[in-house]
Amino acid sequence: MKLSQLSKIEILTAISIVVGLTSSVAGIGATIASADSPASTTQSSTLIARSVVRSDKLQAMAGALNLTTAQVQTDLKTHNLKQVIANAGLTQATFRQKVQAQLTSELQGQGYSQTQIDNALQHYQSRSQHRQNQ
């Protein structure tokens, strides 16, 4: 059957099926992207790309420590995070609060919703607690 022989209804039906399948595949992809994280209870519409969170978290850590991101990366090659925090004269609790506040501010500035930010922070906190328990 040629395209010119299809009725408008048949064409619209085919388009809606394709759009529906595309949306389903995109939703599955977003769910799979979150499935490898321990706190994968987020909805696909509330995800922030891991690379964005990592980059912004590094900037927030640098801000909390009053260092550049390059200095933080260099310090973490030779010291563990607890030592870097102590060298900056901060407690771990104060450092965590500062990072959370700066990360929230950074993500809000990029237009993410509070739900997306809360999910990212929850994931960040659960990863931090997991590392402390190791």
Image: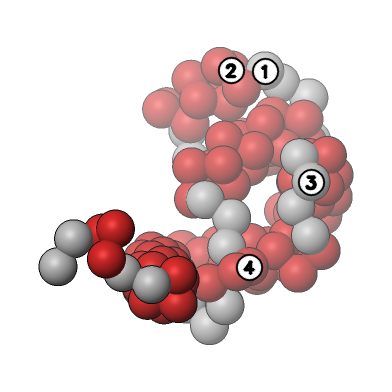
Q: Disc 1 designates what residue?
A: 68
**N-terminal label among 1 and 4:** 4
Q: CA distance from mark 1 to mark 2?
A: 5 Å
**N-terminal label among 1 and 3:** 1
Residue 56: assigned label: none
Viewer-nearest residue: 130 or 32: 32
Q: Disc 3 designates what residue?
A: 111
Q: Quadrant of residue 102?
A: top right
Q: Nearer the viewer, mark 4 or mark 2?
A: 4
Q: Disc 2 designates what residue?
A: 71
Residue 20's spot in the image, x, y percent?
43, 75
Q: Nearer the viewer, mark 3 or mark 2?
A: 3
Q: Amino acid at mark 2?
A: Gln
**N-terminal label among 3 and 2:** 2
Q: CA distance from mark 4 to mark 3?
A: 12 Å
The residue shown at (57%, 35%) is 55
As helix, strand or loop, the secondary structure at mark 4 comes to helix
Q: Residues within 10 Å of mark 2 (few under 14, many from 20)?
A: few
Q: Residues within 10 Å of mark 4 (few under 14, many from 20)?
A: some
Q: CA distance from mark 1 to mark 4?
A: 30 Å
Q: Quadrant of residue 6?
A: bottom left
Residue 46: assigned label: 4
Q: Are marks 1 and 2 in contact (CB under 8 Å)?
A: yes
As helix, strand or loop, the secondary structure at mark 3 comes to loop
